[in-house]
């Protein structure tokens, strides 16, 4: 690696103060620190040794935790396509075709998200003269996973740019933002271009092929909602859904595994849990938020059961865990350390409320079949308030001690 | 009414180069120095000697005009060889070349039974031993005019490679007892002696009377006196407590019983780059070169006065800090590392378990850590980590953010009175975003202290 190091050392004066490309210093610095950990040493006073962790390593851990969901999403995109167009019946038949179709659809979205966001990130770093934030490694991967595979690429680019600028850079970059960046991107698409990210037509890619007669592109959440309206037990509606394609497509186990239409990475609860395992095992995400988030959804589902006035409210609460993006949202979005509650007590409350809200929005609001997106954004806004009271309690304890 | 406190939060940094429990026969240090920068809060130094003067151990060299009853004395007898100043004539060091045979300034022995509190305080302040007494809040040299609500002594040090007081103070029981007797005259409350609850109490501490003996156990920072105060009798706004290290107590005891300022102490010479890590007997402010030179495993090293968490980088020819009982020598880390942020490693220590950081698999292993900064400073991102290494009811990140924002009320309400740098030193080590935590803590203290 000596020649790379020499190359860097040779170029360095160009970008340093007084060099020709001085204004691009932070772009150079990003590349350099990506290749080589810097040779800075600790100061004269204070800690003389430092922990081996840095933000780059932490962020890449999150990216790795998302890989199972990405890979599954790629395959499932192809699977749903062939299933809807009558090309396949079994899960593992036509493996190669499914994989190729998935890759052709998903990879461009990933590339566009990284490229668009990366350019904005670099531009801001150069103009505002701050180092490039590693947080984008995660955002760039999260955005593709929460949109349908049919999303036009220009919308992906636009949403990414919007989210990076409005949700992050205007606040000063990673660490300063209030809202989860990837969720903001999705919310932007949801409200700006609802036709491409809601309804029954967008979740399954059909391409130039024609769907099988009687095919419905509805997601499990939509089926459940309609069952509530029609007065059919939800589990029954789910099990008979799309019976022209195969039996029991929306069975609990299929919902859990993720062999259902939906956004690219969010369908599989199993893959989200696998990600959760990595995040909790490495200590990167807060287990408190994940546990309390799932618990909150279950509790609210159960409360709904008690006061059920329609069939959706009477749905067994565990179905909330496996339908829609709840698992993905709780594991990867709610745990974003910057936009989540930052106190340990606050994390319990924050996660619990995300679970509550998701189920409330799902069941009671006809306009938004999926609740996790709005629940996370809503709680992002309220996280500082939760922390405020937790911190206040800490101050009060100190004050009371003084006056006793 | 002794207390037993078991702490769970914290992190032990196991390093290579623990001192063997024996006194090494290193050549004695020739020069000794007193550095005003060692005394935090030292405001207006006034030098009382000139280059070329001869002094005895205990001769006043320096005072702080802001608190002129406390003298800073020469640790040894000899000749003043240099009064070193830096930019804008800032006083850096007063160097003394030691005599072959030590002579002491002598005063009469103190009869603790008959002396009153203020006379005792004045005597100690004029003796050279006083700067061992530190005031909380702020961690500055105590003011003899104050009466603290209690005095705290931590009888063990949990810092990386820290010396074992059971070894360094053996045979000093008499002086330790006298020191504690003197201290208990100075406070309106108790003297707390906090021992390591996870080990048998060393002989030197086991027979002590007149102090409340508390047991603390757990990972570092269980041995930090600030953490102990928090669990025994926390400091509130307007209150004053004092802390003294056991070495300082022994020096006080020697003045009480012998009437001299004897700054001798046994220090640990430690670290992965030291060939023969061991203990050595010397005096306060010793030049470290004779202990270090010829005792090194490699050439490119960083010599630290103190430990790797709270110490100060000095030169091979540098001087031991007044409060330090340890020298640590580690490799200098000024190298680039190809993809250093991504490589899996078992060689680098981490409190975290993020991708590729495998040190958590072998918690007992001793590590060789260098002074590399391990990445660049970023905004606060990860949460919950600081809290998990701070065994106090304090929210470090909120406190640090309040300091960055210079929000005086918040700084006060979030507990600045209870901490000094060393109490959050572990936060600086584990920080993902590489903030200068200890520097910020001092900034926060100064904001409040001088407001």
Image (cartoon, rainbow, N blue to C red):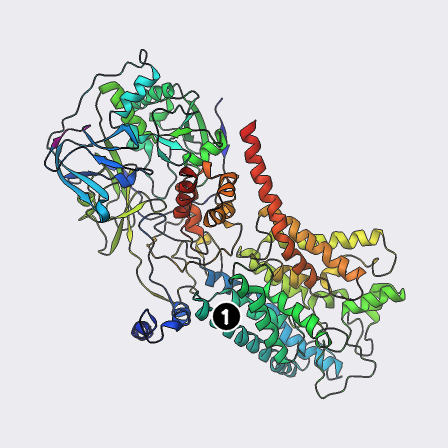
Q: Would you identify the image quadrant in which residue A181 lies?
A: bottom right
Estimate the x, y position of residue A349 in percent, counting from the top left: 66, 49
Check disc 1 and report the residue beneath it: A121
Q: Which secondary structure is most common in the magenta stretch?
A: loop
Estimate the x, y position of residue B293 in percent, counting from the top left: 18, 48
Mark 1 Cα within 10 Å, few/some/many (few <14, many 20+)? many
Chain bearing tag 1 is A
User: What's the magenta region?
Assistant: B54-58
Whether residue B56 appears in magenta in the rendering, the answer is yes
Name the foreground residue: A225 vs B353. Answer: A225
Q: Would you identify the image quadrant in which residue A224 lies?
A: bottom right
Describe the element under mark 1 as helix, strand or loop.
Answer: helix
Whether residue A321 appears in magenta in the rendering, the answer is no
Estimate the x, y position of residue B382 in percent, counting from the top left: 51, 55
Q: Is residue B251 left or right of residue A133?
A: left
Residue B451 appears in the rendering: yes
Q: Is residue B274 above or below residue B24?
A: below
Name the foreground residue: A110 vs A195. Answer: A195
Name the foreground residue: B65 vs B278. Answer: B65
Estimate the x, y position of residue B65 in percent, counting from the top left: 27, 32
């Amino acid at each position: 690696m000596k020649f790379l190091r020499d190359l860097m050392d040779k170029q360095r004066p160009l970008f340093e103060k007084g060099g020709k490309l001085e204004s691009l210093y932070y772009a150079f610095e990003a590349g350099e620190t990506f290749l080589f950990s810097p040779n800075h040493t600790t100061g004269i006073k204070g800690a003389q040794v430092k922990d081996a962790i840095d933000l780059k390593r932490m962020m890449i851990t999150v990216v790795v935790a998302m890989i199972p969901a990405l890979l599954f999403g790629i395959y499932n995109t192809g699977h749903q396509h062939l299933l809807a167009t009558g090309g396949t019946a079994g899960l593992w038949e036509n493996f190669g075709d499914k994989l190729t179709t998935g890759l052709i659809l998903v990879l461009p979205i990933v590339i566009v998200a990284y490229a668009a966001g990366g350019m904005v990130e670099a531009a801001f770093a150069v103009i505002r003269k701050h180092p490039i934030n590693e947080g984008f490694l995660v955002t760039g991967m999260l955005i593709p996973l929460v949109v349908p595979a049919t999303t036009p690429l220009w919308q992906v680019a636009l949403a990414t740019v919007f989210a990076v600028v409005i949700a992050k850079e205007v606040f000063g970059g990673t660490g300063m933002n209030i809202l989860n960046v990837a969720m903001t991107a999705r919310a932007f698409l949801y409200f700006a271009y609802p036709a491409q990210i809601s309804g029954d037509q967008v979740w399954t890619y059909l391409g130039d092929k024609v769907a099988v007669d009687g095919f419905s592109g509805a997601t499990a959440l939509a089926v459940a909602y309609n069952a509530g309206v029609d007065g059919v037990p939800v589990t029954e509606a789910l099990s008979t859904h799309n019976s022209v394609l195969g039996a029991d497509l929306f069975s609990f186990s299929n919902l859990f595994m993720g062999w259902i239409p939906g956004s690219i990475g969010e369908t599989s609860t199993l893959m989200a849990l696998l990600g959760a395992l990595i995040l909790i095992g490495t200590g990167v995400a807060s287990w408190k938020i994940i546990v309390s988030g799932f618990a909150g959804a279950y509790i609210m589902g159960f409360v709904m059961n008690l006061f059920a006035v329609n069939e959706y409210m009477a749905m067994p609460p565990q179905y909330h865990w496996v339908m829609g993006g709840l698992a993905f949202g709780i594991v990867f979005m709610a745990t974003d350390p910057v936009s989540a509650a930052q106190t340990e007590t606050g994390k319990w409350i924050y996660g619990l409320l995300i679970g509550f809200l998701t189920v409330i929005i799902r069941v009671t609001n006809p306009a938004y079949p999926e609740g996790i997106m709005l629940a996370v954004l809503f709680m992002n806004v309220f996280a500082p308030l939760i922390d405020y009271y937790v911190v206040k309690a800490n101050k009060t304890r100190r004050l009371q001690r003084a006056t006793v | 009414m002794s207390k037993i406190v078991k702490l769970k939060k914290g992190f032990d940094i196991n390093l290579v180069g623990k001192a063997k429990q024996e006194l090494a026969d290193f050549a004695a240090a020739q020069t000794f120095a007193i550095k005003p920068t060692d005394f935090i809060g030292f405001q207006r130094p006034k030098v009382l000697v000139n280059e070329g003067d001869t002094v005895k151990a205990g001769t006043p060299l320096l005072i702080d005009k802001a608190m002129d009853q406390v003298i800073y004395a020469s640790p040894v007898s000899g000749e003043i060889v240099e009064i070193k100043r830096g930019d804008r004539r800032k006083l850096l060091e007063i160097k003394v070349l030691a005599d072959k045979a030590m002579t002491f300034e002598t005063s009469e022995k103190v009869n603790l039974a008959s002396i009153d509190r203020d006379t005792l305080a004045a005597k100690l302040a004029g003796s050279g031993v006083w700067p061992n007494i530190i005031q909380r809040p702020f961690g500055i040299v105590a003011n003899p005019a104050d009466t603290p609500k209690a005095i705290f002594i931590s009888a063990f040090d949990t810092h990386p490679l820290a010396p074992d007081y059971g070894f360094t103070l053996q045979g000093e029981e008499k002086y330790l007892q006298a020191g504690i007797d003197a201290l208990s005259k100075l406070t309106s409350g108790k003297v707390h002696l906090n021992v390591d609850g996870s080990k048998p109490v060393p002989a030197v501490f086991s027979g002590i009377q007149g102090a409340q003996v508390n047991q603390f156990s757990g990972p570092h920072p269980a041995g930090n006196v600030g953490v102990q105060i928090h669990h025994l009798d926390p400091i509130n706004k307007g209150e004053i407590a004092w802390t003294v290290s056991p070495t300082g107590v022994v020096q006080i005891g020697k003045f009480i019983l012998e009437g001299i300022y004897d700054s001798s102490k046994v220090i640990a010479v430690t670290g992965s780059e030291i060939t023969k890590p061991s203990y050595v007997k010397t005096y306060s402010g010793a030049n470290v070169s004779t202990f270090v030179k010829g005792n090194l495993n490699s050439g490119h090293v960083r010599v630290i006065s103190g430990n790797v968490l709270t110490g100060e980088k000095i030169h091979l020819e540098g001087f031991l800090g007044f409060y330090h009982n340890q020298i640590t020598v580690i490799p200098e880390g000024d190298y680039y590392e190809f993809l250093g942020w991504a490589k899996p490693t078992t060689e680098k220590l981490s409190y975290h378990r993020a991708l590729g950081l495998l040190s958590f698999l072998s918690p007992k292993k001793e590590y060789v850590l260098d002074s590399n900064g391990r990445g660049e400073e970023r905004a606060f991102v990860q949460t919950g980590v600081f809290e998990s290494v701070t065994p106090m009811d304090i929210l470090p990140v909120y406190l640090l953010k309040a300091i960055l924002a210079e929000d005086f009320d918040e700084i006060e309400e979030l507990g600045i009175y209870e901490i000094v740098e060393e109490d959050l030193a572990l936060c600086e080590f584990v920080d993902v975003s590489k903030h200068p935590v200890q520097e910020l803590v001092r900034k926060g203290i100064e904001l409040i202290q001088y407001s």
